[in-house]
Amino acid sequence: MSCRNKSFHKPSQEAPYLKSTPATPQDSIPIQLAVGVFDPLSENGLPTLPPEWTLKQYPKNKPGYYILQFSGPVLQEWKDALIMAGVFFFDYIPQFAFILKMDEEALEAAQKMNSVRWIGLYQPGYRLHPSLLSEASKKNVPIEIIVSLFEGEDIIIVRAELEKIGADILDISLQKDRIKLKTAGSKINAIAKINGVKFIELAPLYKMSQ
């Protein structure tokens, strides 16, 4: 079964791993990201992102990064079941959510679990510090940014992808999985779409340590 695009938007009766009706104020469980606070099952749904900051799906037969929200306080047995299904856990997100890496088979298994409230793509727009939004609108103005990668990603491969985009690599921290680079604001959305990218922020004034 392939991942259906509508599964990442408002609830539907055809998406059994989501609630089929909007959440009420009593059972609302918001997710807190840098881009904002939202309940994916509420009437307002997901944060509104420009098309250039979104993905409809990941390439077929390749793992991707998702946000998965549990239905309540997280039990270890829920996490263990997902790990057994081939899911890799990363950062915790309030409330009751995690960033995960999984392929289509693991996604199918997660969709069927009663403990799962919602699953959605970890969109490129979620990977951006809010202060960068205004910088990204300055299309041709070069800025220095820090690109953080998920643990386990090949930083050399990501570097090659960044160079293809036209980024000027300034520094690499192998221990911290971070790359400092200079690029035009118009390139930031393409950088955010690189699969292994976790977060992007403005570079501090001090030099990165190795």
Image (cartoon, rainbow, N blue to C red):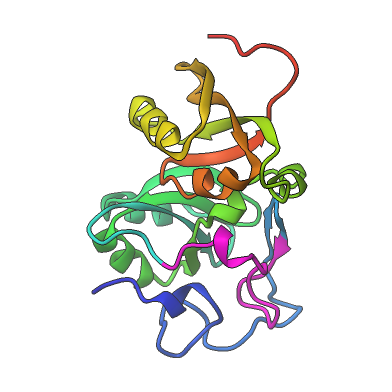
Residue 184 in the image: state x and y as whole percent: 62, 38
* Magenta span main SS: loop
Q: Is residue 198 left or right of residue 1?
A: right
Eyeballing the image, is 130 above or below 206?
A: below
In percent of the image, x 33 and y 71: which residue is there? Answer: 3
Depth check: give the residue in front, 6 or 89. Answer: 6
Residue pictured at 62% horizontal, 13% vertical: 208
| The N terminus - image quarter | bottom left
Q: Classify residue 89 by image quadrant.
A: top left
Magenta-colored stretch includes residue 116: no
Which stretch is magenta? 37-56
Residue sitting nearer the eye, 113 or 101: 101
The residue at the point 55 percent across, 32 percent down is: 147
The answer to whether one can see residue 140 in this image is yes
Q: Residue 40: give x, y in percent of width and height.
A: 61, 71
Is 208 displayed left or right of 151 in the figure?
right
Q: Is residue 52 magenta?
A: yes
Please identify the residue farthest to the front as the structure is shown: 140
Image position of 147 (left or right of 160): right
Count of picture labels: 0
Say whether residue 76 is visible: no
Residue appearing at x 45%, y 39% in the figure: 165
Q: Could you tell me residue 125's position as x and y percent?
A: 60, 55
Relative image position of residue 137 (x, y in whole percent)? 72, 51
